[in-house]
Image (cartoon, rainbow, N blue to C red):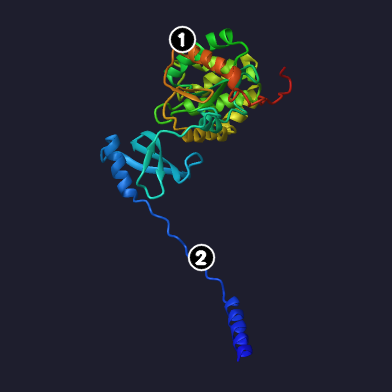
Amino acid sequence: MRFLFLCFLALGLMAQGKKKPSKPVAVEQPKRDLAKIEAYLRHLNLWTPEIKFEVVDTQPSSMLPGFDEMTIKASLGERFAEQKILISADGKTIVKGEVLDTSANPFIKDIALIRNVGQPSMGTVGAPVVLSVYTDYQCPYCREQAKTLRANLMKTFPKEVRLFIHDFPLEQIHPWARPAAIAGRCIYLQGEENYWKYHDWVFDQQQALGAETFRGMLMSWAPANGIDSLQLTRCYDNKETDGEVTQDLAGAKKLGINSTPTLYVNGRKLAGSVSWEQLKSIIDVEVKYQATAKNAGDTACCSVSLTTPGVK
């Protein structure tokens, strides 16, 4: 009897061992009530019903586990503003502001979005301070800023700063701003020195230029200033550099830029007109900080140029 009992016990244990493992039970993640979140943020920010509310992007937060970084866009016609919040998985907790890592540059996110490689530039390669300027050739405030930078920047900071130009033509209100951006990039292909000749000319002539007269004035100016007219005509008329302008606009959108001029000093955003005194003091602070921090500065290396036969 004892032998039979042991046999039955062994068979029972063997049968138990052959049972299929049970599947893990899926835990349903809490869902956010987006309508409730929208109502809360509208109340918080005094966004009236005519203001359009949109969730632009949601990404897991790399700094705060269990939270997502959500980008909110509020717009009214052509005007808009973006706001970033940290929100818990269930949507019950919102953190305004940013979670910062003191071992990294505080503006690292914007620095990562600013693509300076291949942009017109001046200054010292590898400089500790980078100015990235988003400009519109038809914007009067951009003209004044351009003149200020050209008059002061390299004279005051001959080795400490590198300046990059980005195109942000406001086509809704400036009809020849995008053609001017296309032309500038066409001339940039003929050398950086030629680009800066164009940059200064277009801002000097801003009040005289118009949508109907821009091309004619450009083509009259170019050959007298060492620009290959045939190459410029082909490039401009075929809009060969329009894609680069579109890329700049897309980059500006990711950064939340909605006006010109907008400057970034090692990622620090300065929107609107900034006096030379203000800008100089910010650059001074950044030069001193980067002497030990070394977590920003120029990494774009080289410029882009195209050799033109017959043009030295």
Q: Residue 277 has which mark?
A: 1
Element assignment for label 2: loop
Name the residue nearer the viewer: 37 or 277. 37
Q: Is residue 162 above or below residue 31?
A: above
Q: For marks 1 and 2, give the CA distance.
A: 64 Å
Q: Quadrant of residue 42?
A: top left
Q: Earlier in the sequence, mark 1 or mark 2?
A: 2
Q: Tell me where residue 29 appears, x and y as whole percent.
A: 42, 56
Quadrant of the image for the C terminus? top right
Q: Position of residue 275 (x, y in %)?
A: 44, 12
Classify 10 Å Cα crowding around label 2: few (below 14), some (14-19), many (20 and above).
few
Quarter of the figure that contains the N terminus: bottom right
Q: Is residue 75 left or right of residue 125?
A: left
Toward the bottom, the furthest residue is 1
Please tell me the numbered disc located at residue 310. Answer: none
As shown in the figure, which amino acid type bears the numbered disc 1?
Answer: Glu
Residue displayed at 53% across by 9% down? 152
Which residue occupies the extreme front position in the image? 2
Identify the secondary structure beneath mark 1: helix
Q: Position of residue 262 (x, y in %)?
A: 46, 23
Which residue is depicted at the point 60% across and 76% down?
17
Q: Which residue is mark 2?
A: 24
**In the image shown, does 139 or 45 lie closer to the viewer?**
45
Image height of 261 relative to 154, above or below: below
Q: Residues within 10 Å of mark 1 (few under 14, many from 20)?
A: few
